[in-house]
Amino acid sequence: MLRASLLFTLSLLSYWDAHLAFAAPVSPPPSAPVVDRAQGNAEDPRSDGKPSCRFERPKVWTSGSVSWQGRCRDGFAEGIGVLLNAVEGQEAERFYGRLHQGRLNVGVLQTGQGYIAGTWAGGTVAEKLADDMAQRNAIIAAFRAAADASTSVSKSLVKKGDGKASRFYAKQARSLRDQMD
């Protein structure tokens, strides 16, 4: 099952690369100052969320209202959780995984067409690794992080008394884990 899921994921990544023209992450020049949008810089991609908990959205999410279900630290989303993109008239898309200082780090983007899994930089999934085993391990790590994130959100929703949403995220966690079987 893992092989079939992995092949599907890799073919989906190829589809997205071909149809959305993902660009490789570009590092700023060494002399470029790094200033947070939370402090007023419009260049920072971590512009979504509350002022006390900013985050970047995946680049493919060009519209919609994005929310973070997870922890925040020092004004940014931090750790495992779920980003939810709600666009009127469409099914919500989710990023399950880990954010670091409000930036996508590792996880799975669930879309209507399937999954995009791996490590992330600059709001896009990183380029495919040349070593097939390393690529496979990166995808497995992304699905593990995604399942852990969904489980964590499920548990937090139980504590808040939202059983229906908790069950949804518990089911999502099982589905994400099943991608590794």
Image (tube, rainbow, N blue to C red):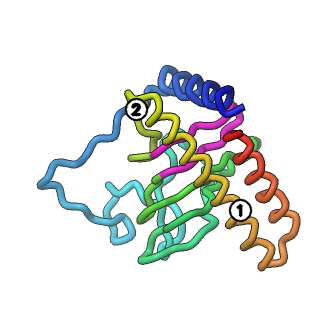
Q: Residues within 10 Å of mark 2 (few under 14, many from 20)?
A: few
Q: Position of residue 152 (x, y in %)?
A: 68, 66
Name the residue located 68 percent from the left edge and 26 percent from the top edge. Answer: 4
Q: Residue furthest left?
A: 31
Q: Amino acid at mark 2?
A: Leu
Left-right relation of 33 to 156: left
Image position of 95 (left or right of 166): left
Tell me: residue 109, above or below residue 83.
Answer: above
Label 1 secondary element? helix
* Residue 75 relative to residue 147: left or right: left
* 53 inside magenta stretch: no
Question: Which quadrant is the N terminus positioned in?
Answer: top right
Q: Give me the C-alpha separation between circle 1 and circle 2.
A: 28 Å
Magenta stretch contains residue 113? yes
> Which residue is found at the position 83% from the left and 71% from the top?
162
Q: Is 45 placed above or below 163 here?
A: above
Q: Main secondary structure of the magenta part?
A: strand
146, 47: nearer the viewer = 146
User: Which region shows up in magenta?
Assistant: 106-119
Measuring 43% from the left and 31% from the top, which residue is drawn there?
128
Quadrant in which residue 139 is drawn: top right
On the rendered image, what quadrant is the C terminus found in?
Answer: top right
Please indicate whether residue 175 sits to the left or right of residue 121 in the image.
right
Q: Which residue is mark 2?
A: 129
Identify the element where label 2 is drawn. loop
Question: Sequence-wise, which precedes: disc 1 or disc 2?
Answer: 2
How busy is the neighbourhood of tag 1: few (under 14 within 10 Å), some, or many (20 plus)? many
Residue receiving disc 1: 151
Residue 142 position, x and y percent, is 55, 47
What numbered label is drawn on residue 35? none
